[in-house]
């Protein structure tokens, strides 16, 4: 009998020890959500956003430069190409990232058609939402959806694109026309007050440049600082 108790005790001890050691299985590939919009009548006319569950993200857009911009004139002299292409790698704040993937789950990971197919609806852009992880994948293209989760996710992604495009224009203005910075930043502040500006930390590098540059008007630098101070860093 003592021998039996010794064996039981050893098994219990081993169970406690091994249960305290984390399992080191092969790390799962991060889940990925993608959103793209094609709307030739808008600026930009195309953009795509890729967000991973670990926070890393990528944005790409293409459109046309303003006809009277210095960069357009420079490109005209080179190859008559007025296309404006923008690529940005960034990290998305945890709160926004969690909301994105929660909405994807509510929308069934886009494994079913999410388009409303309502007739006589105006064309407001060809949108595609996609999702992929180690266990499932889905993709759906739509003009308009009545699914509340898809509507919320579409609005969120469009707001994120708006923020990133602000950063793109700020970079252009900072290089070519610093006096235009204040108007862009004022527009950003208005959206921020309406809680329609998402992902400001993604464009922090250009905001930091503006804040640190004494050749930029003080009122403009103050706007940039306020935007960073209230940025979503959750």
Image (tube, rainbow, N blue to C red):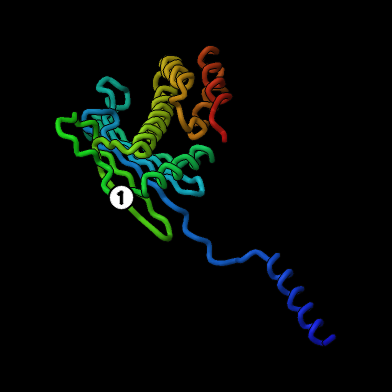
Residue drawn 28% across the image and 23% down it:
66
Q: Residue at the right extreme?
A: 2
Instruction: Decide: is 81 above or below 128.
Output: above
**For the view shown, which residue lies furthest in the left direction?**
120
Task: Look at 47% across and 58% down and name the residue there.
Answer: 29
Q: Secondary structure at mark 1?
A: strand
Locate residue 67: give its quadrant: top left
Residue ID for mark 1: 139
Report x, y in % for residue 196: 43, 25
In the picture, measured across the screen, residue 142 lies left or right of residue 186, that is: left
Q: Position of residue 189 (x, y in %)?
A: 47, 18
Query: Horizontally, is 70 left or right of 126 in the view?
Result: right
Which residue is depicted at the point 39% across and 40% down?
Answer: 59
Residue 214 makes an appearance in the image: yes
Residue drawn at the location 26% of the way across and 35% of the way down: 144
Vertical placement of 209 versus 145: above or below? above
Q: Nearer the viewer, residue 113 or 23?
A: 113
Which quadrant: the C terminus?
top right
Query: Which residue occupies the foreground of this view, 126 or 214?
Result: 126
**Foreground residue among 74 and 47:** 47
**Frontmost residue, 184 versus 178:** 184
């Amino acid at each position: 009998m003592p021998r039996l108790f010794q064996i039981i005790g050893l098994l219990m001890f081993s169970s406690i020890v091994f249960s305290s050691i984390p399992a080191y299985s092969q790390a799962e590939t991060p889940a990925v959500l993608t959103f793209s919009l094609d709307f030739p009548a808008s600026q930009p006319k195309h953009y795509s956003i890729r967000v991973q569950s670990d926070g890393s993200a990528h944005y790409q857009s293409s459109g046309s430069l303003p006809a009277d911009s210095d960069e357009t004139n420079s490109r005209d002299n080179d190859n008559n190409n007025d296309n404006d292409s923008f690529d940005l790698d960034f990290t998305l704040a945890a709160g926004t990232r969690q909301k994105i993937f929660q909405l994807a789950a509510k929308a069934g990971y886009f494994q079913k058609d999410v388009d409303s197919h309502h007739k006589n609806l105006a064309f407001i852009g060809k949108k595609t939402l996609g999702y992929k992880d180690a266990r499932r994948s889905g993709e759906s293209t739509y003009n308009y959806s009545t699914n509340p989760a898809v509507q919320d996710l579409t609005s969120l992604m469009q707001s994120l694109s708006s923020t990133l495009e602000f950063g793109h224009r700020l970079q252009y203005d900072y290089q070519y026309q610093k006096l235009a910075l204040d108007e862009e930043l004022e527009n950003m502040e208005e959206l921020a007050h309406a809680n329609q500006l998402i992902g400001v930390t993604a464009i922090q590098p250009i905001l930091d440049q503006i804040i640190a540059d004494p050749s930029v008007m003080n009122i403009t630098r103050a706007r940039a600082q306020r935007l960073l101070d209230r940025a979503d860093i959750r």
